[in-house]
Image: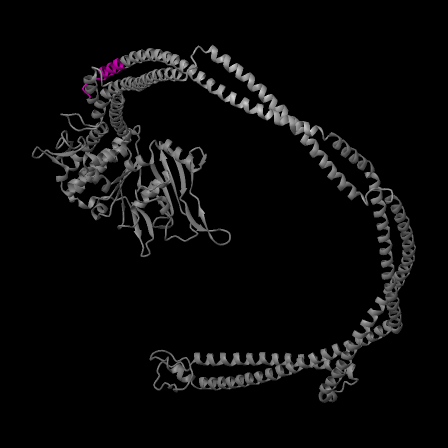
């Protein structure tokens, strides 16, 4: 890749559009980029890097920071470059993201980053991602490789020269992307560590299962269990021990089960005997209780039979009471009819009284309404002409209001006229002052002009020189030139006086015109006042207007206002009377209709009242006739008596039923007890046991003692069975866990045996060997090739004295090795550390190493050959001979059509290298570029 033309705009220290024609430098050889420190030399390479990859070359210079702080805010920031690659010409243009003023309106907008690549066939590729991918495809290297191959930065490679193995590992990891080997090392190390932890965890888990096993300490396995718990048995031996314990416990559990079944059978037999004995004792007790109850029931039976006979003798009284109740119940409807007629008679009487009260109230209302109607008719008659009067007063009020409005207008015009008159007077005064000032300045100018003309001779004389002609007489000899007076004005002063006089004159004319305009306004307003005065007062004489206009207005205004006030009061009264008349005209017909309706209602009420009274008398007579045929006064009394008799009848019947029921119940209980006694005697006879109480008690005691003994034995067997079952369950789980963890433990141990040596080898931890990691081993191959490339330059630049060599052995077995660097001194045959080189020698060594690294990276990138390289600074530490050697080595890089640019401010290089790009910076910090051949 060889740049042909670079255009930089508002980028870094380059404020304006700056073009660098790289074709002028030729196709090969050395050229110098020179300028003071900070002028912007390295920015040229930053611009190339940004154009190609969208990023600058420096680690600390972001593309977002490259907007020039010196540029005009409307100047666009961009880099455009035309370059040659494999004989084809490409053009690329990029701009970073930056803030700029809005093109429309005010405010600031963000100019987004953008890129365009123009291909040799005329195609244009846009979008940053597509451009980046195409550039890497064209050049064959990425941005990081480009900066390492095309930009040899002295400071960076001096670090590489003096770095330790650990520091070089980090540098080479980034350059040659060997991080994947480091990842492999770490993964192997982590895998070995993880397997170790897993093995320990599995062993601990297996032991935990063993510790959880339960052993029968009463047998002969006590010693073996102690060994197992203390870890003196192997995994297999421990498994066999737990299996033996399980077999022994299962056998014992079977024996316990068999004995427990026999005990259960004996216990059931003893329990059956106890149940029979308890049953006989219980039945004997029941027989005694039944005999006592039978005697009691026999005594009650006689008493209850007598009570039942007494209740049967009351049957006639019960029948008579029932007949009375039935008779009363049959007459209840007649009592209901009696109550109905009495209630209806009261209802008709109440209705008649209500009608009479309503008629009385309505008659009183009719009298009141009639009186009010007469009063309203009289009032309406008195308001007969209220509407006509209101119209007449309203017309008078409109006339007075119009006259008052005209008087108000003429008053306003008079006030305006008086103000205008004052303005006229003020404008005339200002004009007189301005005219006086103009006259004074005119006089002053005339005096100055005369004095100036009088002294012209003196002014001319001040310019006379011997041998030079006089502009007046032409003489070249001036024996007595005229002298200027001290108070004579100069030509400039005269012009100033003329200017002041002219300005004062113009100002006076302007004030004169203003006074005329004010006077004209006042005259127009006065004419208007005269016309209005004539309309109102019948005169338009100026003298009368001047002397009598104000008193006439005041008198007319006062009279009109008094008349208007009087009319307002009369109109209020007239409006009130007119409104009242309207109300009365609407109300009187309504009241008349209301009185007629009330009178008709009163007549109807009289008829209804007479009818209700007649109906009430008839109903009262019917109720009296019906009451004379009944036993009780009303239905309520009849019902009350009937309820009392019914309750008494129910009591007699209930007493009879209760006596009969008690007798039957007692008889039934007596018979049941007799049957129960007979059954118990049969049951006792069939039991087979003697009924002697003491003998029954002795037999029961013996059976209970046997049952208790068997119960205790069974509980002991249960405890032994539970303990054995718990051991079996626990040891089953422990055995399963030991077997499972044992299998996993064996598999983990197998993996650990091959992963651990592999991890130690990859991480340089093999005992008795150098501590070289896998990544370092790979980097050593790259480093050896870099050193081989570097020595082809270092031997030249050191005059054949020095050669670089990778150290084969570490300083000690504790530190990592493999990338340490020594220097071979062919003058004395010694090998020593590169840190012992002097400043100039270190520069040569680091430059050689940097060039060697550049060669190696180009080969790694598929043999990419860049047609342009840059070497940045570092030449200031070299003496004249060393500088020549370094330049000769760099010249060797130019073979095969390569341009090598040296970025330096060393004066000696300016004399040695003719082709130069000179960068200068002005006092404001703005840089410019020129190509010098």
Vertical position of residue 815 compared to residue 606: above or below? above
Q: Quadrant of residue 632?
A: top right
Q: Is residue 234 inside the magenta stretch?
A: yes
Quadrant of the rendered image containing residue 181: top left
Can residue 109 be seen here? yes
Q: Position of residue 670 (x, y in %)?
A: 58, 21
Side of 600 relative to 693 (left or right): right
Magenta part of the protein: which range? 231-245
Q: Measuring from the top left, give residue 116's x and y in whole percent.
A: 43, 39
Describe the colour scheme in one phrase.
one colour
Q: Is 676 displayed left or right of 348 in the figure?
A: left
- The answer to whether residue 370 is magenta is no
- Between 354 and 496, the one nearer to me in the picture: 354
Front in this rendered view, residue 582 or 547: 582
In the figure, 136 relative to 671: above or below? below
Vertical placement of residue 725 versus 312, above or below: above
Quadrant location, the N terminus: top left
Q: Main secondary structure of the magenta part?
A: helix
**Is any atom of residue 586 visible in this view?**
no
Please provide percent x and percent y for residue 63. 36, 44
């Amino acid at each position: 890749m060889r740049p042909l033309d670079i255009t930089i705009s508002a980028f870094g220290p380059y404020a304006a559009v700056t073009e660098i024609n790289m074709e002028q430098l030729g196709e090969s050889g050395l050229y110098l980029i020179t300028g003071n420190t900070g002028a912007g030399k390295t920015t040229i390479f930053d611009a190339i890097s940004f154009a190609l990859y969208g990023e600058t070359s420096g680690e600390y210079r972001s593309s977002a920071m490259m907007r020039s702080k010196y540029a005009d805010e409307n100047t666009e920031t961009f880099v455009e470059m035309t370059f040659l690659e494999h004989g084809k010409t490409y053009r690329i243009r990029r701009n970073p993201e930056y803030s700029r003023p809005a093109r429309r309106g005010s405010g600031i907008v963000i100019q987004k980053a953008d890129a365009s690549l123009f291909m040799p066939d005329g195609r244009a590729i846009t979008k940053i991602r597509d451009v980046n991918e195409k550039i890497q495809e064209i050049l064959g290297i990425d941005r990081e490789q480009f900066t390492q191959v095309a930009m040899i930065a002295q400071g960076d490679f001096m670090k590489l020269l003096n770095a330790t193995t650990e520091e070089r590992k980090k540098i080479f990891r980034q350059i040659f992307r060997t991080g994947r080997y480091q990842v492999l090392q770490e993964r192997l190390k982590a895998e070995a560590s993880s397997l170790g932890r897993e093995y320990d965890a599995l062993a601990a888990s297996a032991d935990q299962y063993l510790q959880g096993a339960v052993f029968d300490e009463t047998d002969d396995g006590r010693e073996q269990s102690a060994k197992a718990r203390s870890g003196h048995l192997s995994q297999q031996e421990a498994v066999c021990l737990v299996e033996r314990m399980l077999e022994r416990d299962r056998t014992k559990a079977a024996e316990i089960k068999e004995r427990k079944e026999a005990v259960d059978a004996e216990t059931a037999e003893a329990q059956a005997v106890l149940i029979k004995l308890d049953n006989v004792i219980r039945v004997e007790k029941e027989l005694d209780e039944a005999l006592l109850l039978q005697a009691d029931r026999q005594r009650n039976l006689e008493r209850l039979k007598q009570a039942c006979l007494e209740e049967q003798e009351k049957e006639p009284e019960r029948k008579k009471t029932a007949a009375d109740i039935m008779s009363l119940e049959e007459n209840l409807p007649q009592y209901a009819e009696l109550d109905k007629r009495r209630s209806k008679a009261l209802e008709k009487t109440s209705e008649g009284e209500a009608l009479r009260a309503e008629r009385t109230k309505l008659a009183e209302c009719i009298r009141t309404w009639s009186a009010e109607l007469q009063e309203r008719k009289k009032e309406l008659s008195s308001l007969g002409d209220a509407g006509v009067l209101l119209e007449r007063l309203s017309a008078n009020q409109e006339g007075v209001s119009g006259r008052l409005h005209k008087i108000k207008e003429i008053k306003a015009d008079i006030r305006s006229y008086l103000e205008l008159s004052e303005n006229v007077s003020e404008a005339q005064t200002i004009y007189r002052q301005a005219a006086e000032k103009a006259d004074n300045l005119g006089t002053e100018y005339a005096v100055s002009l005369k004095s100036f003309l009088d002294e012209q001779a003196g002014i001319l004389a001040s310019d006379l020189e011997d041998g030079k002609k006089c502009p007046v007489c032409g003489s070249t000899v001036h024996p007595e030139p005229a002298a200027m007076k001290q108070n004579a004005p100069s030509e400039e002063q005269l012009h100033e006086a003329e200017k002041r006089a002219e300005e004062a004159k113009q100002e006076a004319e302007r004030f004169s015109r203003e006074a005329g305009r004010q006077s004209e306004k006042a005259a127009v307003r006065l004419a208007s006042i005269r016309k209005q005065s004539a309309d109102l007062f019948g005169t338009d004489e100026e003298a009368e207007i001047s002397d009598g206009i104000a008193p006439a207005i005041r008198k007319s205004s006062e009279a009109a206002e008094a008349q208007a006030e009087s009319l307002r009061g009369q109109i209020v009264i007239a409006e009130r009377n007119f409104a009242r008349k309207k109300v009365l005209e609407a109300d009187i017909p309504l009241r008349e209709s209301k009185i007629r309706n009330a009178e008709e209602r009163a007549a109807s009420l009289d008829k209804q009242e007479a009818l209700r009274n007649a109906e009430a008398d008839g109903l009262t007579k019917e109720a009296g006739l019906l009451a004379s045929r009944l036993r009780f006064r009303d239905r309520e009394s009849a019902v009350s008596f009937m309820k009392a008799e019914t309750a008494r009848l129910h009591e007699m019947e209930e007493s009879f039923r209760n006596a009969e029921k008690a007798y039957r119940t007692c008889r039934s209980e007596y018979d049941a007890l007799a049957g129960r006694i007979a059954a118990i005697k049969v049951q006792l006879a069939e039991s087979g046991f003697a009924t002697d109480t003491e003998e029954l008690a002795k037999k029961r005691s013996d059976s209970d003692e046997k049952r208790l003994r068997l119960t205790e034995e069974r509980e002991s067997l249960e405890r032994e069975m539970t303990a054995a079952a718990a051991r079996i369950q626990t040891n089953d789980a422990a055995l399963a866990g030991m077997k499972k963890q044992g299998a996993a433990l064996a598999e983990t141990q197998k993996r650990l045996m091959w992963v651990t040596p592999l991890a130690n080898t990859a991480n340089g931890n093999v005992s008795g060997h150098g501590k070289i990691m896998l990544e370092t081993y790979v980097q050593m191959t790259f480093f050896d090739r870099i050193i081989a490339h570097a020595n082809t330059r270092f031997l030249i630049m050191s005059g054949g004295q020095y050669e670089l060599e990778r150290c084969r052995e570490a300083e000690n077995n504790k530190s990592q090795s493999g990338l340490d660097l020594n220097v071979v001194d062919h003058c004395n045959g010694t090998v020593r550390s590169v840190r012992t080189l002097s400043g100039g020698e270190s520069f040569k060594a680091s430059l050689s190493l940097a060039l060697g690294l550049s060669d190696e990276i180009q080969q790694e990138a598929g043999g990419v050959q860049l047609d342009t390289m840059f070497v940045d600074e570092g030449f200031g530490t070299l003496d004249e001979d060393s500088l020549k050697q370094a330049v000769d080595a760099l010249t060797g890089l130019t073979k095969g059509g390569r341009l090598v640019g040296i970025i330096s401010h060393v004066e000696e290089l300016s004399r040695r290298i003719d082709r130069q790009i000179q960068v200068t910076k002005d006092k404001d910090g703005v840089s410019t570029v020129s190509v010098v051949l």
